[in-house]
């Protein structure tokens, strides 16, 4: 018993301390690696191994980023409903550092997505503060829009043909690229190196589908929030995280042992999600996005929140389908 306690102790403490702790027992040579035994920390609630992807026929809706042109007169039932309520209900999360996260000092929600939502509230209600935030996981976004429990979702949400079957999107407001985040010492340099490795992704995302498509030999660990992926990577329960560079940069900024590797695995055009029936709101939001592209607000928000990704690009141009 005493002997095994000393062995465990040797795993974490210098040999000089062992002299006192273990009395007359032999002092370990600190050049010999100790054989420590660890138990696994628990996985975050809701973590599962994702089942292999079923083959799904690729949807083709033309250019999915093509949206509805801003109307000169922005009034309509959805806009009227929000103005009558006096607050814009915005769905996003608190676990995406840089994009939407809670400032630990002020307790306020901050980030690129939060700033975009504030510009919509500024135009709609005359005050960027008039927002009620509903915290959503990635997997909650579509249902929250279909149920109208939120007016808009501004949460790193990629515009896809499949999602356009169920919800409407604004024009593209950010162009992200899917990458891989690993420990600097991992030896993983890109998608080929995660074969037979464990990769963390949030459930209900394009990131999950793409990693299964590009690297079917990876074991995909699906969790509710991107911040859960940071925890399991730090705990050694996965070897990599894969999602948009905008999210990975935020995770990397919280841990100096992490780095993004490899080229872009795919492009992720972000849109503001809106209920299909609220076409007046789509047109209104597109008016705000046009304004912030043109008046320099978009670039100011980028420089404030995402400078770590490089110099501000030109904002994605609006594409309209009508
Ligand atoms: N952009 C990806 C998506 O919409 C991943 C980001 C996220 O889920 O928050 O699925």
Image (cartoon, helix red, strand yellow):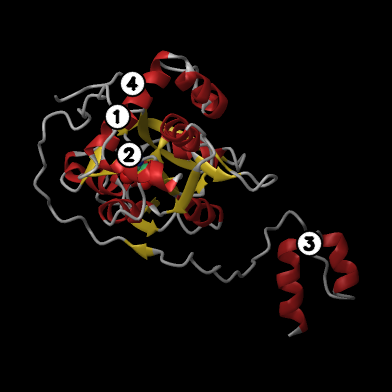
| Label 4 to label 2: alpha-carbon separation | 25 Å
- In this picture, is 92 found above or below 19? above
Q: Which of the two marks, 1 or 4, is nearer to us in this view?
A: 1
Query: Could you tell me which residue is drawn at 60 percent across and 42 percent down?
Result: 254
Which of marks 2 and 4 precedes in the sequence?
2
State ligand 1's quadrant: top left
Q: Secondary structure at mark 1?
A: loop
Crowdedness of circle 2 by 10 Å Cα count: few (<14), some, many (20+)? many
Q: Earlier in the sequence, mark 3 or mark 4?
A: 3
Q: Name the image quarter holding residue 263.
A: top left
x%, y% of residue 49?
Answer: 34, 63
Q: Quadrant of the N terminus?
A: bottom right
- Nearer the observer: mark 1 or 3; the answer is 1
Q: Is residue 200 left or right of residue 258?
A: left
Residue 198 appears in the figure: no
Residue furthest to the front: 84
Q: Reading the chain from its start, which is encountered first: label 1 or label 4?
A: 1
**Does the beta carbon of the residue at mark 2 sit less than 8 Å from ligand 1?**
no
Q: Which residue is mark 3?
A: 13
Discs 1, 2 touching: Cβ within 8 Å = yes
Say what secondary structure mark 3 lies in: loop
Q: CA distance from mark 1 to mark 4?
A: 23 Å
Give the percent coordinates (x, y) of residue 158.
Answer: 30, 38
For disc 1, the marked residue is 74
- Quadrant containing the C terminus is top left
Q: Which residue lies under the disc numbered 4?
A: 316
Task: Give the mark nearer the N terminus: 3 vs 2.
Answer: 3
Among the 4 quarters of the image, the one containing residue 80: top left
Identify the mark nearer the N-term, 1 or 3: 3
Q: Which residue is mark 2?
A: 79
Q: Look at the numbered disc 4 and give the secondary structure of its residue.
A: loop
In front: label 4 or label 2: 2
């Amino acid at each position: 018993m005493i002997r095994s306690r000393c062995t465990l102790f040797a795993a974490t403490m210098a040999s000089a301390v062992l002299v006192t702790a273990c009395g007359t027992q032999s002092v370990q040579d600190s050049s010999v690696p100790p054989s420590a035994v660890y138990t696994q920390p628990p996985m975050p609630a809701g973590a599962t191994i994702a089942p292999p992807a079923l083959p799904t026929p690729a949807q083709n809706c033309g250019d999915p980023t093509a949206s509805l042109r801003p109307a000169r007169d922005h009034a309509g039932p959805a806009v009227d409903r929000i103005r009558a309520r006096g607050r814009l209900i915005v769905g996003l999360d608190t676990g995406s550092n840089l994009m939407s996260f809670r400032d630990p000092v002020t307790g306020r929600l901050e980030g690129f997505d939060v700033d975009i939502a504030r510009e919509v509230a500024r135009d709609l209600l005359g005050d960027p503060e008039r927002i009620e935030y509903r915290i959503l996981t990635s997997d909650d976004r579509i249902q929250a829009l279909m149920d109208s429990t939120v007016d808009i979702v501004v949460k790193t949400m990629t515009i896809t043909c499949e999602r356009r079957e169920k919800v409407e999107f604004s024009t593209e407001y950010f162009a992200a690229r899917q990458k891989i985040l690993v420990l600097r010492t991992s030896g993983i340099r890109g998608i080929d190196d995660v074969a037979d490795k464990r990769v963390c992704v949030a459930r209900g995302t394009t990131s999950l589908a793409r990693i299964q498509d590009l690297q079917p030999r990876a074991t995909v660990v699906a969790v509710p929030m991107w911040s859960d992926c940071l925890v399991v990577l730090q705990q050694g329960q996965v070897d990599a995280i894969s999602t948009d560079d905008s999210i990975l940069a935020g995770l990397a900024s919280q841990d100096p042992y992490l780095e993004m590797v490899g080229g872009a695995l795919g492009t992720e055009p972000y849109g503001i999600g809106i209920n299909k029936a609220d076409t007046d709101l789509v047109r209104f939001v597109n008016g705000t996005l046009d304004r912030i592209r043109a008046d320099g607000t978009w670039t100011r928000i980028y420089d404030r929140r995402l400078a770590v990704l490089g110099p501000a690009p030109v904002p994605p141009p609006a594409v309209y389908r009508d």
